[in-house]
Image: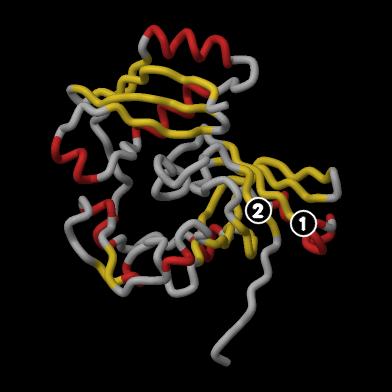
Amino acid sequence: MKHHQIEIIGKVHSPYQQKFAVPRQPGLVRAATTTIELTGPYSQPDCCRGLLDFSHIWVIFVFHQTVASGWKPLVRPPRLGGNQRKGVFATRATYRPNGLGMSVVKLLSIDYHSGSTWITVEGADWVDETPVVDIKPYLPYADSVIDAQGGFADNRPTTELVTHFSEQAIQDLALLADDYPNLKELIGQVLEQDPRPAYNKAAHQEKIYGMALYDLNIKWRVKQQQNIVLSVTKAF
C-alpha cells in the first residue's frame, strides 16, 4: 500500500490566530483552553462514549499552514537556536512528509449541541482552524516511559524572561475582563515561552512585537530580560 486517504473528523477553535506565539509543545501554556469541534458522522455521541473516563487524550492533526510547502529532510529546531540541522524524523518540525502532528492535552469536557460534538481541552498548541484527523485516549501505563531519553530536548524549556504589564495594558485588560476572564494569565504564559525568532533573541533587539489571541492584538517589547506588554486591543 503506497497511499492512504485520511478523513478530517473536525477542526480546532483556538485562541491562537497565527503560527507566531503558538507554544512549541503542548502543556506549556495551561491557561489556554481550546475546543475541538467534531463534525459529520464523527459528531455522533457514540464516538466519544467513555472518553471522559480518561484525564488526557492524544490528538492527531494536520499542519495545515505549512503542508502545501512540502517536507524537508533537514530542519532547524528552535530549541537549538535555529543554527543546527536535525533530520525531520528526529524533530517535531511542521514540514513533514504527511504534515501530521500529535499532541497530548488535558480533557476538560465534552458537550453536544448545534449538531456537533465539542471537546474542550487544556494546554493545546494548535492554530485556530487546525484540522483534526483522530483522537485517542492517553494511557499512563503505556504512554509514560520512565527511563526515556529526550535527545536535544531532554528537559522542559526554561526562560529567564519575566512579564510585566504597562499601565495602558492594565487598563486595556480591565475593559476586556468580562469577555476574557483569564486573559492576563494567558498572555503571561505565552510570553514566558519567549516566542521571538532565535535570531532576534541573539541580537537583543528591543523592537515591538505583536501577536493575535482570539480577536485581540497584543503588543509587547523585551527589555533587560523582561517582557513588557504595551497594549491589548481589539483586532477589528
Asked if the residue under mark 1 is in contact with the one under mark 2, i.e. CB atoms within 8 Å, the reply is yes
The residue where tag 1 is placed is 39
- For this orientation, the residue located farthest to the left is 203
Count all numbered tags in the image, as a single digit: 2
- For this orientation, the residue located farthest to the front is 236
Tell me where residue 78 appears, x and y as whole percent: 28, 52
Residue 86: give its label.
Answer: none
Q: What residue do we see at 51% from left, 33% from top?
A: 213
Above-or-below relation of 155 to 59: above
Task: Determine whether the residue tagged by mark 2 lies in a helix, strand or loop.
Answer: strand
Q: What residue do we see at 48% from left, 29% from top?
A: 186
The C terminus appears in which quarter of the rendering? top right
Q: Within 10 angstroms of label 2, few (less than 14), some, or many (20 or more) residues?
A: many
Tell me where residue 44 appears, x and y as whole percent: 84, 58
Above-or-below relation of 211 to 233: below
Q: Which kind of residue does numbered mark 1 sit on?
A: Thr
